[in-house]
Image (cartoon, rainbow, N blue to C red):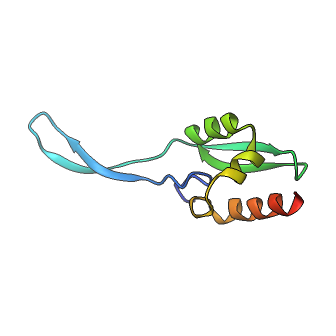
Amino acid sequence: MSKRCELTGVSPLKGHNVSHANNKTKRRFLPNLKKVTFKSDKLKRNISLRVTSSAVRSVDFKGGLDQYLKSVKKQKLSRKAQKLKLSIHAKV
C-alpha cells in the first residue's frame, strides 16, 4: 500500500538522524496518513480515502469533499480522486 496522500499528494521525505557526535544515518519522514470516510453531497454516497491529517483539515475548511476537489489541481490527486473529481464535475 502506498504511503501517499490521495488528496494532497504528500509522500515520504528523506533525511538523516543526527547523533550528538554528528554521525548521520539515513531515515524517512512518513506522512501522517489516516483512512477517512468523506460524505459527497453531489454523488450522495460515502467515499473512503487515505489522507493526511492536514488534508482532513483542508477539506473541512473548504466546506466538504465536493468543494475541495473543485478547487484543487488535478496533478496533486491520486487516480481515484481524479475520477471522483470528474464524476462530481459531471453532476453539476
Quadrant where the C terminus lies? Answer: bottom right
Q: What residue is at 64 percent from the left and 49 percent from the top? A: 50
Q: What residue is at 69 percent from the left and 35 percent from the top? A: 60
Q: So how many labels did they put on this image? A: 0
Q: What residue is at 69 percent from the left and 63 percent from the top? A: 82
Q: Residue furthest left?
A: 21
Q: Horizontally, is 9 left or right of 66 in the view?
A: left
Indicate the position of residue 61 as horizontal and vertical percent values: 66, 34
> Which residue is nearer to you in this view: 54 or 49?
54
Quarter of the image for residue 17 reads top left
Q: Horizontally, is 58 left or right of 3 in the view?
A: right
Indicate the position of residue 18 as horizontal and vertical percent values: 19, 40
Q: What residue is at 17 percent from the left and 47 percent from the top? A: 24
Q: Horizontally, is 89 left or right of 14 in the view?
A: right
Q: Is residue 56 above or below residue 69?
A: above
Q: Is residue 40 above or below residue 4?
A: above
> Which residue is nearer to you in this view: 53 or 68?
68
Indicate the position of residue 3 as horizontal and vertical percent values: 52, 55
Quarter of the image for residue 19 reads top left
Quarter of the image for residue 73 reads bottom right
Indicate the position of residue 37 as horizontal and vertical percent values: 75, 43
Quadrant where the N terminus lies? Answer: bottom right
> Which residue is nearer to you in this view: 35 or 89?
89
